[in-house]
Image (tube, rainbow, N blue to C red):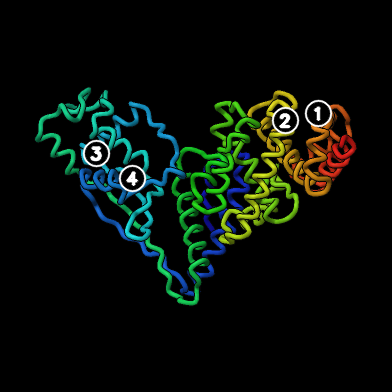
């Protein structure tokens, strides 16, 4: 039996991605096997000029919330333009048809490179004449027409509801899962993505949209900023709120860190793909109030950084401390009151700092902390969270 091809993700996220993939695919499988939905593919070859006109008018669109930053350099963009001109085969544009529009799930860089070239925003170099080192608008009319008439394949997928018993909410959730799964399978074949990129570039759900919005709140950005470039790429600040949101949604503190997170990814998936608007609204309100209170208390980034490690380890440790901090503040506000916390603000912040310093100096706590962050030990997370709560409560 042939081995299943491994997805190219970073080693720190590979297991959780594969587990999430399996959970999503298993959910979709039931509907496909029972002929309740149908995933209908089609392919057509479209002229470059027509394709870009659709892209510019928005009929063929890349959701700005899911778009990755344009990262092609001039060399790569130039070679792509040359391939199109020479009629070499290039990867198709993958889209999902949605209410008369087509959402691009793979092909943003190819479309954007064509648009930039046609609109004279870059000059290709090191390629064949007559294109070499010339803006598109400076080419002879005949050459421009030839280029615009070159064809690129567009692969379209339509998700069809065949069972009328499937509710609109259920069908919308299924479409979200299918789009995410297609995005992940197509886009992870080349440049590895971290888990945050997989979530925030691949899932268009209300929960993910909510986390994006919360991560841009001025109070939150003041707490976690200024962000390092590595943090922006890893979207660490979004991951903190994603994990906090999942914990609040499930009503318990869940350890998504380290290797143990693969055992609890179903809890995360339940939050990521939920269509329960009322519950999401409640979660959002709780996160907003927690962020506001943490900001008023004076929680800042330096408080959440214990020491300097390698990038991946540092991000994991910072995420763990931030999650513990927000969860503890939320619990204290519910059980002691916000007013009590704010009245003892200086003592509370000092207590947080003192406790976190103990995580690296006291052998027992340090071992628990390492098992919590690296092995994803749920029991150790709960133990540390309880000790932290009791320690901070004494300062109030």
**Apparent side of residue 54 relative to residue 193 in the rendered image (left or right):** left
Asked if labels 4 and 2 touch by Cβ distance under 8 angstroms, the answer is: no
Which residue is under mark 1? 346
**Apparent side of residue 190 relative to residue 156 in the rendered image (left or right):** right
Q: Is residue 252 above or below residue 136?
A: below
| Mark 3 nearby-residue class (10 Å; few <14, some 14–19, many ≥20) | some
Pick whichever, 178 or 293, lies toward us.
293
Pick whichever, 35 or 3, lies toward us.
35
Q: Distance from label 2 to label 3 (Cα)?
A: 55 Å
Q: Distance from label 4 to label 3 (Cα)?
A: 11 Å
| Mark 4 nearby-residue class (10 Å; few <14, some 14–19, many ≥20) | few
Q: Position of residue 43 (x, y in %)?
A: 29, 57
Q: Distance from label 2 to label 4 (Cα)?
A: 50 Å
Which residue is under mark 2? 298
Closer to the N terminus: mark 2 or mark 3?
3
Q: Is residue 284 above or below residue 223?
A: below
**Apparent side of residue 106 relative to residue 352 in the rendered image (left or right):** left
Q: Distance from label 2 to label 1 (Cα)?
A: 8 Å
Asked if labels 1 and 2 touch by Cβ distance under 8 angstroms, the answer is: yes
Which residue is under mark 3? 84
Q: Residue at x 58, y 51 (%)?
A: 18
Circle number at residue 91: 4
Query: Comparing marks 1 and 3, which lies closer to the viewer?
Result: 1
Q: Quadrant of residue 85?
A: top left
Q: Residue at x 41, y 32 (%)?
A: 71
Closer to the N terminus: mark 1 or mark 3?
3
């Amino acid at each position: 039996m042939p081995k299943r091809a491994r997805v190219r993700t970073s080693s720190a996220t590979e297991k959780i991605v594969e587990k999430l993939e399996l959970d999503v695919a298993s959910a979709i499988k039931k509907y496909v096997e029972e002929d309740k939905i149908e995933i209908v593919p089609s392919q057509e070859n479209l002229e470059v000029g027509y394709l870009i006109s659709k892209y510019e008018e928005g009929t063929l669109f890349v959701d700005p919330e899911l778009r990755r930053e344009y990262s092609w350099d001039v060399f790569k963009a130039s070679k792509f333009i040359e391939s199109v001109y020479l009629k070499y085969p290039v990867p198709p544009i993958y889209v999902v048809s949605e209410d008369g529009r087509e959402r691009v799930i793979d092909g943003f860089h190819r479309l954007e490179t064509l648009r930039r070239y046609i609109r004279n925003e870059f000059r290709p170099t090191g390629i064949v004449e007559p294109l070499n080192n010339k803006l598109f608008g400076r080419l002879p009319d005949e050459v421009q027409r030839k280029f615009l008439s070159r064809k690129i394949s567009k692969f379209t997928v339509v998700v069809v509801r065949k069972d009328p018993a499937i509710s609109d909410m259920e069908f919308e959730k299924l479409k979200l899962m299918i789009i995410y799964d297609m995005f992940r399978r197509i886009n992870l074949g080349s440049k590895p993505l971290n888990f945050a990129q997989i979530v925030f570039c691949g899932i268009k759900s209300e929960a993910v949209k909510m986390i994006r919005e919360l991560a841009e709140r001025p109070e939150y950005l003041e707490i976690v900023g200024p962000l390092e470039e590595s943090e922006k790429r890893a979207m660490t600040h979004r991951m903190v709120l994603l994990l906090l949101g999942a914990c609040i949604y499930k009503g318990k503190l869940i350890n998504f860190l380290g290797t143990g997170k693969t055992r609890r990814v179903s809890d995360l998936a339940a939050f990521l793909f939920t269509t329960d608007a009322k519950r999401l609204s409640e979660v959002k309100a709780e996160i907003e109030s927690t962020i506001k209170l943490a900001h008023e208390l004076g929680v800042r980034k330096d408080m959440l950084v214990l020491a300097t490690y390698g990038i991946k380890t540092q991000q994991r440790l910072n995420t763990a401390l931030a999650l513990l901090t927000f969860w503890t503040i939320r619990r204290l506000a519910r059980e002691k009151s916000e007013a009590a916390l704010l009245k003892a603000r200086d003592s509370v912040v000092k207590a947080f700092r003192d406790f976190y310093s103990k995580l690296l100096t006291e052998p027992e706590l340090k071992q628990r902390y390492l098992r919590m962050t690296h092995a994803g030990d749920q029991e150790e997370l709960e133990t540390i969270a309880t000790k932290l709560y009791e320690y901070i409560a004494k300062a109030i």
